[in-house]
Amino acid sequence: EDKVVQSPLSLVVHEGDTVTLNCSYEVTNFRSLLWYKQEKKAPTFLFMLTSSGIEKKSGRLSSILDKKELFSILNITATQTGDSAVYLCAVGLHADKIIFGKGTRLHILP
Amino acid sequence: NAGVMQNPRHLVRRRGQEARLRCSPMKGHSHVYWYRQLPEEGLKFMVYLQKENIIDESGMPKERFSAEFPKEGPSILRIQQVVRGDSAAYFCASSAKGAYEQYFGPGTRLTVT
């Protein structure tokens, strides 16, 4: 059965800290790995990764994929209270299907 | 606003009634996906549709649930004879052909009383 596992399930840090969120997967027909940020509404797209070892960056967020070890990490540096959210990892499969992990709930203390 | 639209945003139904959830994809997107999210859980895939075709409904319960995406108009997720366990947030997402980036609507929060 295809599965996506995220860790930790929840994380509390202080503003300014750096956090690393983990995502491992076991799937057949891997096509891509995606990260989303979900606040109290719909998930918003952050990154799509398809190649190993190539870091994607957007401001203070960055992500990298390891297709040999079947995992990805999402880094957030110099965290701000606005980064508090649930971060969802998802894997795109053959035929455009996506399966999601349960998410990491990140809370940034001021 | 060319984003994904869902309505209603909140829907309350009594047990045994029908719930109809609507989703209009982003302009230019021909692929629609429905997900269910229970409290404290991740998004669970339900069904993937293109215009007039169901591509993958492996996440849909076999009974009471159906989905369509007609040639004209929004995609509809229908839940017949709702039960308390159907209470959840239902998200719709859309993507362009051949793209994996899905863009989500604001969701419909269904409460069954």
Image (cartoon, rainbow, N blue to C red):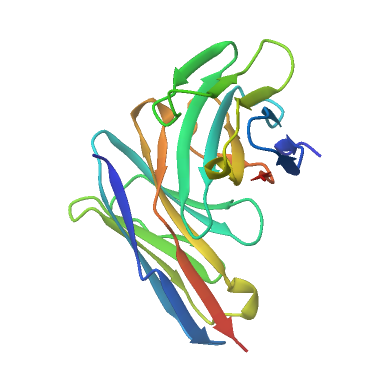
- Using the image as rendered, state which of residue B26 and residue B82 is in the foreground: B82
Q: Is residue B66 left or right of residue A103?
A: right
Q: Position of residue B112 (x, y in %)?
A: 65, 43
> Which residue ends up furthest to the right in the rendered image?
B1
The picture quadrant where one finds residue A21 is: bottom left
Q: Is residue A94 above or below residue B101?
A: above
Is residue B55 in view?
A: yes
Residue A6: horizontal and vertical position, in percent?
35, 61
Which residue extends farthest left? A68
Left or right: where B5 falls relative to A18: right
State the image quarter where residue A94 is shown. top left
Above/below status of B34 relative to A25: above
- Residue B22 position, x and y percent, is 70, 29
Left or right, residue A39 beside residue A46:
right
Give me the residue at 62% from left, 62% from top: A39
Is residue A90 depicted above or below B67 in this figure?
A: below
Residue situated in front as seen by the camera: B91 or B12: B12
Q: Which residue occupies 52% across, 51% down?
A: B38
The C terminus of chain A, quarter of image: bottom right
Q: Can residue A58 be seen by looking at this rendering?
A: no
Task: Indicate the position of residue A22 as horizontal and vertical percent values.
Answer: 34, 65
Image: B44 above or below A104: above
The residue at the point 57 percent across, 44 percent down is B84
Q: Residue at x 47, y 33 (%)?
A: B46
Please identify the quadrant where the N terminus of chain A is shown: top left
The image shows a total of numbered marks equal to 0
